Image (tube, rainbow, N blue to C red):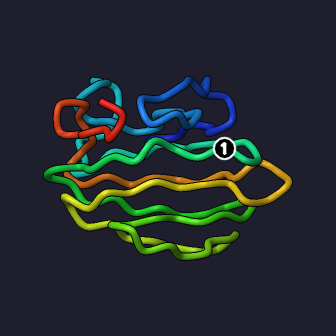
Amino acid sequence: MFHKQTFKIPHKSAVDDTNLAEIIHPIHSKNDPNLPYSLAHAKLDPGKKSTPHKLMQSTETYIITHGSGEIIIDGKTESVHKGSVIVVEPNKEQSIQNTGFSPLFFYCIVSPPWEEKQDISSKL
């Protein structure tokens, strides 16, 4: 069995300007299960927006658990809120913005697992 408490894992500023807690990452942690994906929990404060970026080889799935906002994928904007599930295919520019008055919380599943070398930021 593998068990972690999401809110007990420190959230840190990530390369895309979100606050992120890495929950499962088979490459970064030898104690995590050897799965074909990585899992992170993210927080975005009201009025904040992640830096636009592309994952060159991975599909990213967002699962919104609290709050509301907008996700922008290759220039197309979609409203998101608690319960929304969004799949972003590889090589698509993406960012997420909190348009609400409370923090936006979401999980990110990246398959194959996230690696910095394949995450291309538009601010570079």
Which residue bears the numbered disc 1?
A: 48
Location of residue 28 with respect to 93 vertically, above or below: above
**Residue occupying image coordinates x 38% and y 66%:** 73
- Identify which residue, 95 or 118, lies in the foreground: 95
Q: For this view, does 76 lie left or right of residue 92?
A: right
Query: Outermost residue toward the left?
Result: 57
Secondary structure of the residue carrying tag 1 is: loop
Q: Residue flagged by tag 1: what amino acid is it? A: Lys
Q: Which sits in the foreground, 37 or 76? A: 76
Question: Which sits in the foreground, 8 or 76?
Answer: 76
Q: Residue at x 58, y 46 (%)?
A: 49
Q: Is residue 4 left or right of residue 103?
A: left
Question: Which quadrant of the structure image shows residue 12?
Answer: top right
> Within the image, what quadrant is residue 34 found in?
top left
Residue 35 in the image, given as x and y percentages of width and height: 25, 48
- Whether residue 67 is visible, yes or no, is yes
* Left or right of residue 66: residue 115: left
Residue drawn at the location 52% of the way across and 65% of the way down: 71
Q: Is residue 86 left or right of residue 91?
A: right
- Locate residue 44, reporting x and y percent: 65, 44
Q: Where, quadrant-wise, is the C terminus in this rendering?
A: top left
Seen in the picture, residue 14 relative to 93 is either above or below; the reply is above
Q: Is residue 39 above or below residue 62?
A: above
Q: Position of residue 18 (x, y in %)?
A: 55, 37
